Image: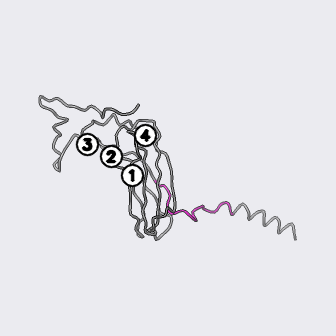
Amino acid sequence: MIRKVVALCLTLVPLTACQRETENKIAEFSGHIFVFNYRLSKANYVVTLRPLEQPLRPGTATAYFDNPRGGDPLVARQILYPNMTKIVLESPDLQCVKEGKAYHIRVEIAGSDGRVRQTLETDLVATIDQSVLPANSLVVGPAYDLNPQVFKPNDAVDLSPVQGCPA
């Protein structure tokens, strides 16, 4: 009888390790990518999170992105609402993204009282170098008129990339 109880206990112990570790988690990464917009000549980080608690408690998600040009991290904030099924954080415009380089992203989820309830961290490796984008957008204005800084008189076109990027 004792052997059966011991065998049962030894069988149940590993099963507790199979439980999902989401008890204190509010969200998890569901995607992260660099978005390059050639027409507007800009690049951004985009991070998406999947809420693990429903309804989501009010608060904020704040993302800190490595700045490819150097200096202080770039910051993006999103207010959290109870009916959100996805949290999207997009960085300000980037310059100097290098292909093959890993960039760090940290997301802090805070409650309505401002206390951080969860921190998520990941790295994102660029698969394209930002030098493929011209320094100036190809178009300007709501009608997408050709940008005179790029398309110059006499059919000259300036598609040179952003200058002064760190090595």
Q: Secondary structure at mark 3?
A: loop
- Helix, strand or loop for the magenta stretch, by majority: loop
Nearer the observer: mark 3 or 1; the answer is: 1
Q: Secondary structure at mark 1?
A: strand
Q: Quadrant of the N terminus?
A: bottom right
Quarter of the image for residue 23 reads bottom right
Q: CA distance from mark 3 to mark 1?
A: 24 Å
Q: Amino acid at mark 2?
A: Asp
Task: Report x, y in % for residue 140.
Answer: 19, 45
Q: Which stretch is magenta?
A: 16-30
Residue hosting label 2: 93
Task: Report x, y in % for residue 6.
Answer: 83, 66
Task: Report x, y in % for residue 117.
Answer: 51, 63
Q: CA distance from mark 2 to mark 3?
A: 14 Å
* Sequence order check, earlier mark of 4 and 1: 1
Residue hosting label 3: 39
Q: Residues within 10 Å of mark 3 (few under 14, many from 20)?
A: some
Which mark is on residue 75?
A: 1
* Sequence order check, earlier mark of 4 and 2: 2
Q: Amino acid at mark 1?
A: Val
Q: Residue at the spot x=42%, y=57% of the render?
A: 62
Residue hosting label 4: 126
Nearer the observer: mark 2 or 3; the answer is: 2
